[in-house]
Image (cartoon, rainbow, N blue to C red):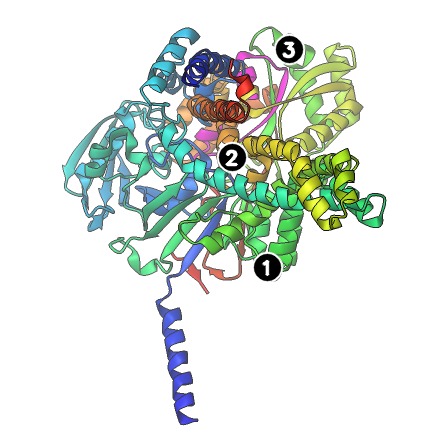
Amino acid sequence: MKAMRLAAAAALVALSCGTAAAQSHLRIGLAEDPDVLDPTLARTYVGRIVFASICDKLFDIDAKLNVIPQLALSNETSEDGKTVTIKLRPNVKFHDGEKFDAEAAKFSLERHLTMQGSFRKPELAAIDTIEVADPLTIKLHLKTPFSPLIAQLTDRAGMMVSPKAAKEAGDRFGLKPVCAGPYKFVERVQQDRIVVEKFADYWDKDKLHIDRITYLPIVDSTVRLANLSSGGLDLIERLNATDMAAVKADSKLKLNELPDLSYFGLTINLANGDKAKNPLGQNAKVRQALELAIDREALNQVVFNGEFVPGNQWVSPTNAYYQKSIPIPKRDVAKAKALIKEAGVQTPISIDFMVPQGAENKAVSEVVQAMAAEAGFDLKIRVAEFATSLKAAEQGDYQMYFIGWSGRTDPDGNIYIFEKTKAPQNVTGFSNPDVDKALDDARLTSDQAKRKAIYETAAKILLTEDPILYLYHRKVLIAQTTRVDGFVPVPDGLVRVVGLRLK
Amino acid sequence: MLTFLAKRILQLIPTLFFVSVLIFSLQQLLPGDPALIMAGEDRDPAVIEQIRKQYRLDQPIPVQYVFWVKGVLSGDLGESMRNKQKVLDLVLQKLPVTMQLASMAIIIALSIGITAGVISAVYKDTPWDYAANVFALWGLSTPNFWLGIMLIFLFSVQLGWLPPSGYVPLTEDWRQSLATTIMPAFVLGNAIAAVLMRHTRSAMLQALNSDYVRTARAKGLLERSVILKHAMRNALTPVITLGALEFGTLLSGAVLTEQIFTIPGFGKLIIDAVFNRDYAVVQGVVLVTATTYITLNLLADVLYVLVNPRLRA
């Protein structure tokens, strides 16, 4: 009997040791398979979620969109706005053991600026030269003052790669990235998984409590949620708004939500080719009438169970740059009809309404269609596959286009390339010298109050001319099991893994 | 025999050439611009220009074709625009996955389909027959994605017996591997089983009504031996041919099923590549599947000739 008890005790000890030694393993479900894992060449949103564990950046943002230091300690912009001095964190190592210093930072930034196929070049275009001031300080000399620069450095443009590894691998670096993030790249099976493991020499290693993370791309959102409910995953990103109730009802699951940086709206063809020649494209009054015909709150209720954030500007009403002087207009069909009459346009106004494929897009556009019909609009929905719709928009082969933007930390990223005359994504053909000047001026100063005042000038014109009718903003929706502890959602929707624990 | 083989192999060359031209030109008909998709959300014009140059998208289509064929002939299928991996590596990575799934699906289909078909023929017009017919109708009319999601809800979410999705290679852990592939294999096999069942049933009915079966019965053979040895053997030939054809289709990937169960096979590879306009990957995968098809066809022809020398002309 005694022997048996001893054996049982021994077995228990062995078991508990087993648990203690077992590696903690976090499994994250992604909505898509990321593209190449090279910060210079990467371009997908989903890729940024993986980078959040592999590649640290010079700066990061917090839940309130404040810029906080990561691999940099501080930044200072000179009086004339043309020199940015960045102090770097000491004692930081890359995954291959190489030292991170000013030379390495210069190398990474120059790689972003000069590498063939770099997607970071336009983001850092303001930089003229990079100077190593001392081993832990770099100075960025700019061509012109550019206040969104630090915000750019909170994303891929601010990611630092090991110079040694990058030189050796060339454009194949993304197959085995070597950065200075909390987790080291282990392996990747295309469309199946990306595995990373804890980096023992991470500069903030005391806050790493999980040994291994596997990212699993699962495209179908129902299946992604089923994986979470059955314990196959610990955390999933981009939950469907329609699944929020199911997650809230499940005691084993927890939902993290907060307004994100995106906007969704109706892009209207004003001057991009012959298709712009229609009452909606030619007359601001007709566009204002369309806006008055739409009830944004009802749209949010019907399609998203009231879970998203109605909006009328390129940043959400919770953002510091939201212009409170221009609130969301209430629906007013009578006024809409009066405006159309004033414009001298015959109803029904028939409009080619291009909508990218997808259940959510279709639902939104059908609600808009029904609301607009009451004011005299005949919106003819044309569903197009996403890639096809992008091309059509660029070529001006549309009259109205339902499309969104994932959003950027700095408001400049949500507006400049869409509304500045002849900017890369100005597919509406909108052009206004006062707006152009305001958008350029806002890039020259870093003072938030001053910038907001400048943007107000632009907003007053843009929200009367209405090249884009902003409708709503999504929310970051990240669902997790209650096993995961310490997750803090940030408006960019990325999954920051430092500080996470598994219970 | 050798001349026959040589002739057939020579015939392969124009066929493959035709296939390659077809793959290349059909793909150009896809609307949308690969450089625009590649450039991501920001779509900077300078970047788009650079992508066009880098992947020769700015060259005329015949020139692009010549470069591609040159690569293919030297064993280089190009690289993925999206993630920089060699297309050949991607194909080799996915091939075993698709092979495993297809083999499991066809085994399930054959076992269910033939058994149900034989039973319903032998017990014609009995409840067994009706049950088998209902099963076949169900299998044919149930959409893969629906059945897949239902299975996930039942076996993964409710009962917690099987992992809901993902894939583990056979070489890594065979039990886990079977656990991850059994549901998708069943979904795929189920639909094929229904087709096989219908064919087996009619072939069996025909065989059971034939003269040699009547003779066998008249000789006083056991019913079991009449059915299994005499009728079934003859009835199965067309069923096996059909099964082989279905297997060929399975090898080219099962898009929906792979998508739902997140099985990283050919189907998922090609559908992602099409939506991302990753031309090199689409071309590479289609070329490999087409070549496999044509080669299997050639093998079948050779086998026929071996069996029936009259065909050697």
Residue annotated with mark 2: B268
Q: Secondary structure at mark 1?
A: loop
Residue B258 in the image: above or below residue A463: below
Decide if residue B147 is on the left or right side of residue B72: right
Let me know if marks 1 and 3 both belong to one chain. Answer: no
**Left-right relation of B24 to A186:** right
Instruction: Kindly identify which residue carries mark 1.
Output: B160
* Image: A132 above or below A382: below
Q: Position of residue A398 (x, y in %)?
A: 61, 15
- At 62% from the left and 50% from the top, the residue drawn is B152
Query: x%, y% of residue A324?
Result: 57, 36
Q: Nearer the viewer, residue B34 or A188?
A: A188
Q: Are marks 1 and 3 in contact (CB under 8 Å)?
A: no
Q: Amino acid at mark 3?
A: Gln
Q: Chain of mark 3?
A: A
Start-end of magenta stretch: A389-414
- Residue displayed at 37% across by 65% down: A22
> Which residue is labeled 3 in the image?
A282
Q: Position of residue B59 (x, y in %)?
A: 39, 9
